[in-house]
Image (tube, rainbow, N blue to C red):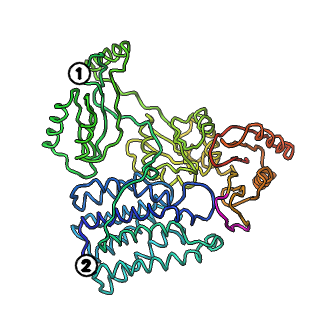
Amino acid sequence: MSANTIDVALLKKMFLSGAKNLDNNKEYINELNVFPVPDGDTGTNMTMTIMSAANDVFNLENPDMVTLCKSISSGSLRGARGNSGVILSQLLRGFTKVAKGYDTLDVAILSAACDKAVETAYKAVMKPKEGTILTVARGIAEKAAELFENGEEDINAFYQACLEHGQKVLDSTPDLLPVLKEAGVVDSGGEGLLTFLRGAYEAFCGKEIEFSMDNDTKKKAETTRKLPTDQPVSAVPEDIKFGYCTEFIILLEGKVFNIQMENEFKDFLESIGDSIVCVPDEELVKVHVHTNDPGLAIQRALKYGQLTNLKIDNMRLENKEKVEKENAKAAETAAAPEEKEEPKETGFISVAAGSGFADIFRNLGADYVIEGGQTMNPSTEDMLNAISQINAKTIYILPNNSNIIMAANQARDLTEDKEIIVIPTKTVPQGISALISFVPEMSGAENEAAMTEAISLVKTGQITYAVRDTSIDGHEIHQGDYMGLSDKSILSNGTDLENVFEETVKGLVDDMTEIISIYYGSDVKEEDAVALKDKIAENYPNCDIDLQNGGQPVYYYVISAE
């Protein structure tokens, strides 16, 4: 086929086809990860990132280029998970910065958009590493520029050449990163990018796809963010005419919601209920209605955009005492607007998997603990939801995983009304040490420096199991082996958990170590953990040994040495 331009309808199909291809191949991409650990890996993170945008794009009806590009950019930015997902979202953000300025895309515009995509992604990474998705993206952009400069105008030939060159760059990544060569794999993020681009090319060539999202892809970390309203939701007697208090937010994502639409929507809500609140701004519409059929309100609202913060309460189940209290409160509030509570100076958000770790962070003063970590990297939107829950001027985020730091930084950059400080904690023990090091009397900058210094003194080991055979760091690893991982390498592996545990501790402890902390996971019996603690205490009599229940999944033990 031959074509010189891509219009908005075709670009929408291409994006959805690319997203679907990435979803279909995510497990293969996961298997390319160097470390054979049972985590939420590159393929999963990239898929959940792009599906956050794809679901929005799928529901757009006859969008223009600006609307489409905004949905792609904002959806992927907010849904970004893991380093690979954040980088992918930045590539899409950069591409759409250029594309949104045109009604159709030709080779010249595509070349400029690829260049902007790479520029944006590289700026988002503190220390860009070659042999990764960034290298593959840059190679494609360089090829695109070369083709444009040589006068290529046919997009089909242009696209094919860029894909072929991208594959060559991907095949070369093991020569740039020795760890890839040792494991016998190419970079998983680069493979994910090409998988997306191949799927998009199939749509360009006319292949029809049936876009859908499976339950695993839809699943996200749950948050407790509540809908803000401009007026209280009054409690009602048991014989109330409309029984369901329904609240949600419509995300406009570039769509127009003019006064005529607002009046039509309000008229519809009034036809099915009462206590109407419909407050629009540039980005969203805040909605509240009492009705006997919430589904009708939801169905009509979907015409205007995606829904979030959905909350439905059956008011008829409220007891009489609560009704009276809520009515009194509503009457008081109606007479005098409720004053907002003054924000406190500082708040803390921590990421952790396991009820024990969550309790530890809360006891140390964390305001909000996001469930996640190795097995599920929280998204940028999860971070933003947590930020919205904390009424504080300055909020510290403890990602506690190297693959979550970029999402936290992205949430920081998207927050305007609060100061967000991301402490780059790469493990849960680092997060605990950072939180302990916080001093209320010090300034934000002083605390950031002190907390960052504190995490540099913490060495962490984690015991898990291998999901496949591989060779890395001089270790021959077999599926099912126990593995002891440090912050940067594998310390031990084998079939005996106790031996791997002891070897891992040995690799962490040095002459300066004073404290060894052991956190046992959900798959470990307390008596087994106590026995290991006692043995470590015998081996290291000059160290204080602390044992706690972390309750973490997948990782039998998390160990820190300070």
Q: Residue at x 47, y 40 (%)?
A: 394
Q: Is residue 433 left or right of residue 324?
A: right
Disc 2 target residue: 3
Q: Is residue 54 left or right of residue 46?
A: left
Predominant secondary structure, magenta span = loop
Task: Examine the structure image and report whether residue 464 is included in the region drawn in magenta.
Answer: no
The location of residue 458, given as percent across then percent down, is: 68, 49
Q: Is residue 489 visible?
A: yes
Quarter location, residue 104: bottom left
Residue type beneath disc 1: Lys
Of the two numbered discs 1 and 2 on the same chain, state the one appearing first in sequence.
Answer: 2
Q: Tell which of 327 and 419 is nearer to you.
A: 327
Neighbour tally class for label 1: few under 14, some 14-19, many 20 plus, Cα within 10 Å: some
Alpha carbons under labels 1 and 2: distance apart: 60 Å
Q: Tell which of 469 and 540 is nearer to you.
A: 469
The quadrant of the picture occupied by the N terminus is: bottom left
Between circles 1 and 2, the one closer to the viewer is 1
The location of residue 538, given as percent across then percent down, is: 87, 43
Disc 1 target residue: 241
Residue type beneath disc 2: Ala
Q: Which residues are magenta?
A: 466-474
- Determine the secondary structure under disc 1: loop
The location of residue 89, given as percent across then percent down, is: 41, 59
Quarter location, residue 21: bottom left
The location of residue 396, given as percent across then percent down, is: 51, 42
